[in-house]
Amino acid sequence: MSNAPRTSHTNRRFDSGHTDDLTAFLAQSPTPYHAVASAARMLEKAGFRQVEETAAWDGEAGGRYVLRGGAIIAWYVPQDATPATPYRIVGAHTDSPNLRVKPLPDTGANGWRQVAVEIYGGTLLNTWLDRDLGIAGRLTLRDGSTRLVNVDRPLLRVPQLAIHLDRQVNEGLKLDKQRHMTPVWGLGTPREGDLMAFLADEAGLPAADVTGWDLMVHSVEAPAYLGADRELLAGPRMDNLLSVHAGAAALAAVAAEGGLQHIPVLAAFDHEENGSQSDTGADGPLLGSVLERSVFARGGTYEDRARAYAGTVCLSSDTGHAVHPNYVERHEPGHHPMPNGGPILKVNVNQRYATDGTGRAVFAAACERAGVPWQTFVSNNAMPCGTTIGPITAARHGIATVDIGVAILSMHSARELCGSEDPHLLASALAAFLAE
């Protein structure tokens, strides 16, 4: 199952401090908008600077990044890069399944004030019950500017029905997405504008200035190590902020080291959980536009762009399934990824993942250079397989793509579980890949 020997921590690029940093990243990134801001701060500490899409770009060496909504594309141009220098890309996504606030949020009945929510992505609904929840996202003002807001304290709760009123609940819980998932946040009569007035005040804004919003609910419980030896890490949004954080850390590390043969890139997209079809999703034009503009800014032609793409490789990094001790029959018998066994190579011959034998060799070489063990994931033939941005990136841009990630439990829960060593093992492998 493991295709490289386990090595001592001293041979790895990142130590457990990386995982400590990940817990802070998760806590400060309750939405895609906050996640890209957090990643940008990491990169700015490494000397990267933001460039606007509406501005003219120069071809100078150095690190840059573009922000658009909940997506970030960052890249580092080495001093001796030519217009035809290929890219090494780490792809990831910033969104996670959750509850999102509806356009008319103020609702309620029978003396309760509630917030109307819509279900985003393939959410495990029961994991949102009886949790202390906050609200975060972005507010759009009359002048078109946006402001992030984060109420990171207990504000909402989706209360479960008491067992006394549903004696058969333990025989099978059935939740109606419309009727049963509306959180409460107070008592009294709901009034239109109450929630926006509250959030505007939290953000230090006049309520009348807020004309648009993109808001979502999050658990306010902090990430935490589990076990006597702290072998496990529990936290929200590991799918897929674990990869976003690892990619940003890897890009910052290789930019500082120099001596690069390729142009390293982090591409973290929004809307993967509902199909990636948006202007900030992997099926949109953002990545291709940034890569092309970088080629042209360095004096390149369409021919240079084609040559650069032909030599480019992308590692699509997303979480995968660790073998579940209580549901072993749901997994492929010969492939049982374990926490702290290193990153996983994700394979599906029906192209739900983009990995092929050539990609496997690229990933194996990166792990070997990093001294990192790795594992292989394939779905049970009797079970449907999920997908990622990998096949989309490969098909849209004609770029060789390999699907990888970290094995976790409780995927799409409000709170997921991984091995505490795996985040820095992934980051080490990504750094070795980007630095080649």
Image (cartoon, helix red, strand yellow):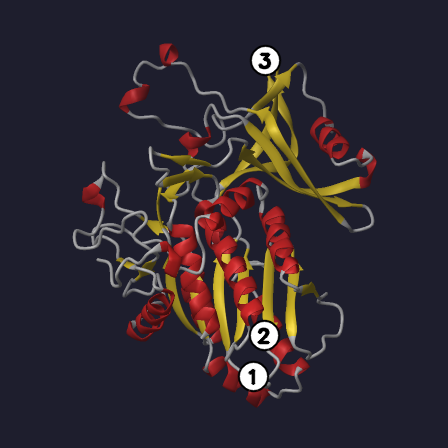
Q: Amino acid at mark 1?
A: Arg
Q: Residues within 10 Å of mark 1 (few under 14, many from 20)?
A: many
Residue 157 picture location, percent across and down: 53, 24
Q: CA distance from mark 3 to mark 2?
A: 55 Å
In the picture as drawn, the residue positioned furthest to the front comes out as: 10
User: Looking at the image, which is closer to me, 98 or 14?
Assistant: 14
- Residue reaching furthest top? 164
Residue nearer the viewer, 135 or 173: 135
Secondary structure under badge 3? loop
Q: CA distance from mark 1 to mark 3?
A: 62 Å
Neighbourhood count class around disc 2 (C-alpha, 10 Å): few under 14, some 14–19, many 20 upward: some
The numbered dot on residue 305 is 1
Q: Residue at x 45, y 58 (%)?
A: 427
Quarter of the figure with residue 215: top right
- Tell me the kind of residue under disc 3: Asn
Mark 2, secondary structure of its residue: helix
Q: CA distance from mark 1 to mark 2?
A: 8 Å
The kind of secondary structure element at disc 1 is: helix
Amino acid type shown at disc 2: Leu
Which of discs 1 and 3 lies nearer the camera? The answer is 1
- Crowding around mark 3 (Cα neighbors within 10 Å: few <14, some 14 to 19, many 20+) is few
Which residue is found at the position 46% from the left and 54% from the top?
A: 243
Which residue matches tag 3?
110
Q: Is residue 373 left or right of residue 425?
A: left
Residue 36 coordinates in the image, percent (x, y):
61, 53
Mark found first going from the N terminus, 1 or 3: 3
Residue located beneath label 2 in the image: 291
Specify the quadrant that holds the C terminus: bottom left
Foreground residue among 116 and 306: 306
